[in-house]
Image: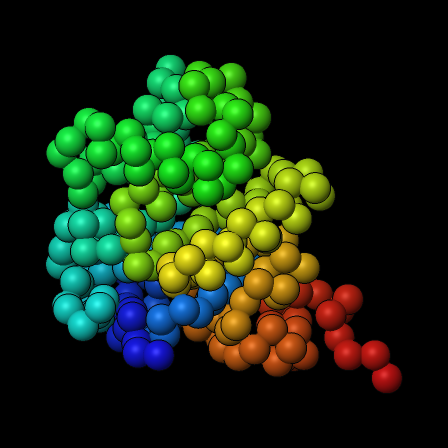
Amino acid sequence: MGILLKASKVTKKFAGLTAVNSVDLEINEGEIIGLIGPNGAGKTTFFNSITGFYPATYGSVTFDGNDITHRTTYQNCKAGMARTFQIVQPFGQLTALENVMVGAFNRLESYSEAEKIAREMIIFVGMEDKMHAIVADLTIGDQRKLEMARALATKPKLLLLDEVMAGLTPTEIEETVELVLKIRDSGVTILMIEHIMAALMKLSDRVIVLDHGTLIAEGTPSEITQNERVIESYLGSAYKKQD
């Protein structure tokens, strides 16, 4: 497996406030990488710096062998990087199909081809029975799945998921875990922020931990759950190894 994404000393400052501080990360093709940390740790800002939403103040980002540090979000999307958002951002008065077609148009100009890809992605995420539903009428769980379908319609190599399980029921969380594995098995590499620890630890090949914008730990799920600094700053005493 080759390195798909490499972030080197990525730093993001806002008016003197350092939100992300010199973070290094390498993601190999086919991996699922979990990104955790307390609220305000800089996780979403790091996502934004990688994707070009908020370009990094310092450092560099290489994706699929190319320097993308100063590229725009739409350029990165065309190159094969897609993301979802912590707060879902659907086109509420459009249908599910029309929402996913928006993603397909990132690469396609033909309406019929975009519709074909959108249908395939909606079926892929298990929402074929809601193909023509108005998105504003869907549950938060369905809207989150739909946002993943829209991202997948761009044909990404790397998919960044920002708390896709937030607000879901236990059953919906289990369904989302299976969907994330299905996405990885289809050939898409995944970087995901998630606060549902049981799900994230089950999914991740490696976990990285941010605290106050700084990378404080990286390792397998087992290593992270036994890391004293991570326990102290984020996980809590429930994760301490029992004697």
Q: Is residue 224 left or right of residue 164?
A: right
The image shows residue 195 at horizontal and vertical percentages of 59, 53
Residue 192 higher or lower than 105, as above or below: below
The image shows residue 66 at horizontal and vertical percentages of 15, 69
Residue at point 50%, 55% (across, down) = 182
The number of numbered badges drawn on the structure is 0
Judge whether residue 28 can be spotted in this image.
yes
Q: Is residue 191 left or right of residue 154?
A: right
Residue 228 higher or lower than 49, as above or below: below
The image shows residue 68 at horizontal and vertical percentages of 16, 62
Q: Farthest bottom residue?
A: 243
Colouring style: rainbow
Quarter of the image for residue 234 reads: bottom right
The image shows residue 213 at horizontal and vertical percentages of 41, 64
Q: Nearer the viewer, residue 197 or 152?
A: 152
Residue at point 77%, 79% (across, down) = 241
Residue at point 51%, 45% (across, down) = 164
Quarter of the image for residue 167 reads: top right
Q: Nearer the viewer, residue 15 or 198?
A: 198
- Image quadrant occupied by the N terminus: bottom left
Q: Is residue 230 left or right of residue 114?
A: right
Residue 100 higher or lower than 63, as above or below: above
- Image quadrant occupied by the C terminus: bottom right
